[in-house]
C-alpha cells in the first residue's frame, strides 16, 4: 500500500541554522509533491509544489528537492527564525491528496 | 487575498445528532474537498466534489456522511448521526483544478461529540 513517512515527529534547531525535513514515500509514482505548513488549530497552508521533472525548487528561504529514484523529498528552511516554528507536512497525489504525519519544527531563539 | 471560510469554528453536539458543517470556497474554484484531522493525527482526505457530484471519496466517508453545494457559494458536509469518534477538526479546501493545483484550506471546524 502507499505510504508516506516524514523523518521525525519533532525537530529542534537554533535560530539562524538551516532546518532540513525529510519525506520518504513507497508504492507511489507521483507526478508532483507538495509541502504545507500547519500551525496549531489551523488548516494547512500551501508552501511549495515540485514536479517529478524538477530536481529543486526555491521560494525565498525555502528549498525543496525531489529525488524520484530515492523516492524522497527534502525541505530546507535557511536562516531559520522562531516564526518558522510549525508542523510541516508533505503531501502526495493519487486518487486523493495524501498527507504525511508531519514534522513539528521548533526554532529556538 | 481570497480565502476559504468555515462556520462554525466550534460545534458541540450529542452523540446521534446530525451536524452540518459549512464552507465558502474561493469563488472561482471548481474543486472542493473535505478533510478531517483527529487530535494529534494526520490530515485525512474525506471527499472531493466537482460539477455537483462526488469525484472521489475515502473509506472514512461512509453512508453517515454527505456533501452538498446548495447554492453558488456554500459547500456543506453533513454527518447524519454523529459518533464519539467523529470528534475532530474538519477542514474544507478548494482548488482551481483537481489536485494538480494549490489547495487552499479553511481555518477548520472543531467538532466535539459528547
Image (cartoon, coloured by chain):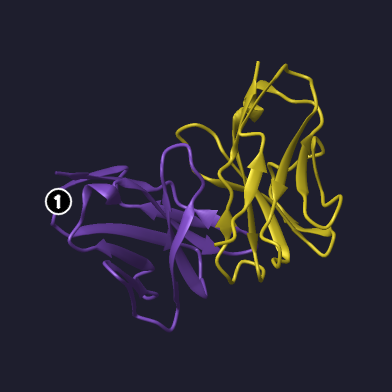
Chain colours: A purple, B yellow
Residue visible at 20% across and 56% down in the picture? A80
Residue A15 vs B111, above or below: the answer is below
Pinpoint the chain carrying mark 1: A
Counting other residues with Cα less than 10 Å from the Cα at mark 1, is it few (<14), some (14-19), or many (20 or more)? some
Residue visible at 51% across and 71% down in the picture? A30
| Percent position of residue B64, x then y | 80, 35
Residue projecting furthest to the bottom: A53
Question: Disc 1 marks which residue?
Answer: A15
Q: Which image quarter is the C terminus of chain B in?
A: top right
Asked if residue A78 lies left or right of residue B16, the reply is: left
Rendering quarter of residue A35: bottom left
In-front residue for pair B32/A102: B32
Q: Is residue A1 visible?
A: no
Residue A55 vs A85, above or below: the answer is below
| Percent position of residue B23, x then y | 70, 46
Q: Is residue A54 visible?
A: yes
Residue A53 vs B67, above or below: the answer is below
Asked if residue A31 lies left or right of residue B99, the reply is: left
Residue visible at 16% across and 48% down in the picture? A13
Rendering quarter of residue A18: bottom left
| Percent position of residue A43, x then y | 51, 46
Amino acid at each position: 500500500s502507499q505510504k508516506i513517512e516524514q523523518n521525525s515527529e519533532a525537530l529542534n534547531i537554533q535560530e539562524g541554522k538551516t532546518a532540513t525535513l525529510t519525506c520518504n514515500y513507497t508504492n507511489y509514482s507521483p507526478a508532483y509533491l507538495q509541502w504545507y505548513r500547519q500551525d496549531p488549530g489551523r488548516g494547512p497552508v500551501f508552501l511549495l509544489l515540485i514536479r517529478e521533472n524538477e530536481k529543486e525548487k526555491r521560494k525565498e528561504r525555502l528549498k525543496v528537492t525531489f529525488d524520484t529514484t530515492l523516492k524522497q523529498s527534502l525541505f530546507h528552511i535557511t536562516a531559520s527564525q522562531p516564526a518558522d516554528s510549525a508542523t510541516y507536512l508533505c503531501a502526495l497525489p493519487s486518487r486523493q491528496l495524501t498527507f504525511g504525519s508531519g514534522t513539528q519544527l521548533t526554532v529556538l531563539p | 487575498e481570497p480565502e476559504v471560510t468555515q462556520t462554525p469554528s466550534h460545534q458541540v453536539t450529542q452523540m446521534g445528532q446530525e451536524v452540518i458543517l459549512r464552507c465558502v470556497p474561493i469563488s472561482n474554484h471548481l474543486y472542493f474537498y473535505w478533510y478531517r484531522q483527529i487530535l494529534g493525527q494526520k490530515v485525512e482526505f474525506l471527499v472531493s466534489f466537482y460539477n455537483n457530484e462526488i469525484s472521489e471519496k475515502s473509506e472514512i466517508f461512509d453512508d453517515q456522511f454527505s456533501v452538498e453545494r446548495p447554492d453558488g457559494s456554500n459547500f456543506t458536509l453533513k454527518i447524519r448521526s454523529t459518533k464519539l469518534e467523529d470528534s475532530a477538526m474538519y477542514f474544507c479546501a478548494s482548488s482551481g483544478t483537481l489536485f494538480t493545483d494549490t489547495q487552499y484550506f479553511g481555518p477548520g471546524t472543531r467538532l466535539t461529540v459528547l
